[in-house]
Image (spheres, helix red, strand yellow):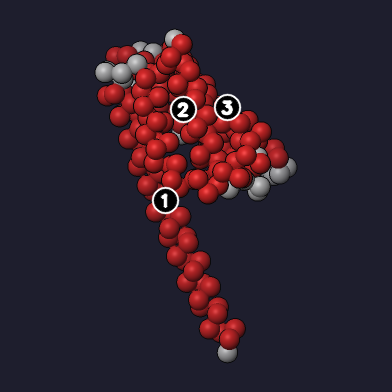
Amino acid sequence: IGGKTSEPSSMKNLQNKTALATLALIGAGILGGLAPIAAKLLLRELSPLALTFFRYTIAGLILFPIVSRYTKGIVTHWKQLLFVSLFFVGNIYFFIFGIGHTTSAVSQLLYGVVPVFMLIEQAISTNTKIRFRQLAGILFGIAGTFVIVLHPVRASGLGTLYGNTLLLFAVFCWFLYLLATKRISRIVAPMEITAATAFVTWVVALVATVTI
């Protein structure tokens, strides 16, 4: 009897977790889509360095009460977290300097190629054969990226070569960040990664704003 009652309960918990994860992904997608638009608007009044500094100052104030309990884990794994944070910082700065020279639509199209990189990495690391449809999608994705970057005409809505190239570097840094966090997530809590990357980005922004 106990087994019968616990099975529906575990299934319900799994469904709840799946629903929460789905909502979280939808929320992240919406916020991610709004970020380039907000950045372009704010860059009319602020420099890229100042915008990054204020952005992560606010993020730090919000995160500090939440992540204070994770201080021990952050200190213990500081080397891994610093390594991961460097990719995150690269993504942030390439993005913030590039978005002012291209369009929000192009930025989303370029970031859309990240799953293609992840699929290639997964196939290599797990020695998994890529199916024909997946291979076709990879080729189309890469070809589309080169078309966007190498056809920088403002009249066509594809931005500039300078802006698109910086965004391509940002996309590559984001891919490396996701790859690195995937590797260390076995020993480091997600909140520790979030707090560490935000702090390192804030420190870099502070130093750059004061010295440059």
Kind of element beneath mark 2:
helix
What amino acid type is highlighted by mark number 2? Trp
Front-most of residues 190 and 106: 190
Q: What residue is shown with label 2?
A: 202
In this rendering, the answer to whether 169 lies above or below 29 is above
Percent from the top left, x then y, of residue 186?
65, 48
Percent from the top left, x then y, of residue 178?
56, 37
What amino acid type is highlighted by mark number 1? Ala
In this rendering, the answer to whether 200 lies above or below 49 is below
Q: What residue is shown with label 1?
A: 24
Front-most of residues 90 and 139: 90
The reply to whether callout 2 and callout 1 are in contact (CB within 8 Å) is: no
Percent from the top left, x then y, of residue 19?
43, 60
- Residue at left offset 50%, top offset 76%: 9
What quarter of the picture does the N terminus occupy?
bottom right
Q: Quadrant of residue 125?
A: top right
| Count of all numbered marks drawn on residues in the image | 3
- Residue at left offset 52%, top offset 29%: 200
